[in-house]
Image (cartoon, rainbow, N blue to C red):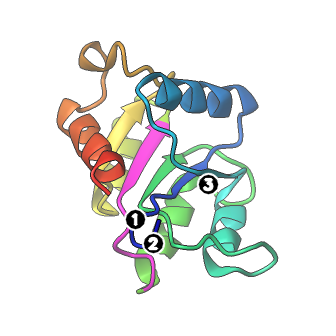
């Protein structure tokens, strides 16, 4: 498999149970791409840039991002990511337990591809507060590569 065909997923999530849930849900729908895990935005940036952590190569095709995390939260991470020409194009899907309109608006201003309310469950996606269009885009990004 060439580097272009490799689909890496970066999961930025500080809650171990939420991390396990995302991995389980992806496996349920047949997604077996490598998942790189970071516990906060700072750790995720280090993994992307290869500073104080091995660099993710190739860069992730998609990032699943929690908002509420220690050290550097999801919105702070996303602000940094969008400033970096090497990574600004990566589609980001926000995952959060927050249903706050202010969080949604902040995420939209930072060009997120979708907003998913946890707990993540692809079985009940149509009944959740998540955008079905976002879910379809997410699947396209990780299956068509």
Q: Quadrant of residue 128?
A: top left
Residue 72 sits above or below residue 23 on the image: below
User: Which callout, 3 or 1, points to the residue nearer the camera?
Assistant: 1
**x and y percentages locating residue 34 in the rendered image:** 58, 51
Please state the horizontal and vertical placement of residue 137, each as a whole percent of the image: 23, 45
Residue lying furthest front in this view?
1
> Residue 76, position in %: x, y?
55, 63
Circle 3: element type: loop
Residue 106 lies, with reference to residue 59, above or below; the image says: above
Identify the residue shown where x is 63% and y is 29%: 18
The boundaries of the magenta stretch are: 86-95
Q: Residue at x 36, y 49 (%)?
A: 142
- What is the quadrant of residue 5 in the picture? bottom left
* Residue 75, above or below 88: above
Against 93, is 132 above or below? above
Determine whether label 2 and label 1 are within 8 Å by CB. yes
Q: Secondary structure at mark 1?
A: loop
Q: Between marks 3 and 1, how big is the CA–CA gap?
A: 30 Å
Residue bearing the label numbered 3: 73
Would residue 49 be seen by someone viewing this image from the given angle?
Answer: yes
Q: Position of residue 73 (x, y in %)?
A: 61, 54
Q: Which residue is mark 1?
A: 5
């Amino acid at each position: 498999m060439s580097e272009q065909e490799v689909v890496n997923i970066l999961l930025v999530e500080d809650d171990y149970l939420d991390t396990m849930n995302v991995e389980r849900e992806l496996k349920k729908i047949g997604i077996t791409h490598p998942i790189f895990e970071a516990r906060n935005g700072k750790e995720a940036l280090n993994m992307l840039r290869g500073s104080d952590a091995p660099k993710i190569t190739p860069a992730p095709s998609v990032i699943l991002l929690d908002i509420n995390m220690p050290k550097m939260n999801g919105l702070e991470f996303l602000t940094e990511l969008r400033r970096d020409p090497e990574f600004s194009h990566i589609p980001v899907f926000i995952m959060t337990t927050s249903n706050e309109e202010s969080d949604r608006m902040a995420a939209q201003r930072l060009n997120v591809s979708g907003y998913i309310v946890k707990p993540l469950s692809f079985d009940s996606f149509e009944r959740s507060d998540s955008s079905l269009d976002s879910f379809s885009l997410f699947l396209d990004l990780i299956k068509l590569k």
